[in-house]
Image: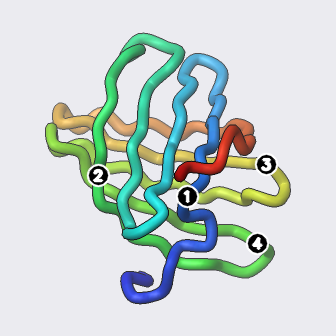
Amino acid sequence: MSTETSFPFAGRTFEVDYGDLVATNAYAADKNSLTYEITGGPPKGATATVAFEWKELDGGNFVISWQEADGSTVVHVDNFEKGLSLSFFTTPKSDFYRLSGTLRALAVRK
């Protein structure tokens, strides 16, 4: 995973929409951290800043992963150009979810 190279979408905010779950991911401009906020769905209002790791794959896809404070693990396969997102996450109770949805740019962070 890349930790020394700057994330190509640093300083940008994106919305992921999986239907029953909608969130924003705001990537920090100066380091590999992101702030997520759940804006739609049962955990609406949940927010945190987490460290993430990423790797660019073929075809404009990026794999992005992080662990949340409660032990949840999250892995995205995002294609920022095509506006597509796959998410795989495990909760602290070992529930496993697979989501597919859209991805769109919202703003440039300062």
**Mark 1, residue position:** 11
Q: Is residue 100 above or below residue 30?
A: above
**Mark 2, residue position:** 50
Looking at this view, is 3 or 58 the one in front?
3
**Mark 4, residue position:** 60
Q: Position of residue 7 (x, y in %)?
A: 53, 73
Q: Position of residue 20 (x, y in %)?
A: 58, 17
Q: Amino acid at mark 1?
A: Gly
Mark 3 → mark 1, Cα distance in angstroms: 17 Å
Looking at this view, is 102 or 97 the one in front?
102
Left or right of residue 107, residue 76 in this image: left
**Mark 4 burial class by Cα count in 10 Å: few <14, some 14-19, many 20+:** few
Query: Considering only order in the chain, which callout, 3 or 2, is on the residue closer to the N terminus?
Result: 2
Is label 4 in contact with label 1 (beta carbons under 8 Å)? no
Query: Considering only order in the chain, which callout, 1 or 3, is on the residue closer to the N terminus?
Result: 1
**Mark 3, residue position:** 83
Q: Nearer the viewer, mark 2 or mark 1?
A: 1
Q: Nearer the viewer, mark 2 or mark 3?
A: 2
Mark 4 → mark 2, Cα distance in angstroms: 23 Å
Q: Position of residue 74 (x, y in %)?
A: 38, 49
Q: Amino acid at mark 3?
A: Gly
Q: Image point 26% across, 36% down: which residue?
A: 91
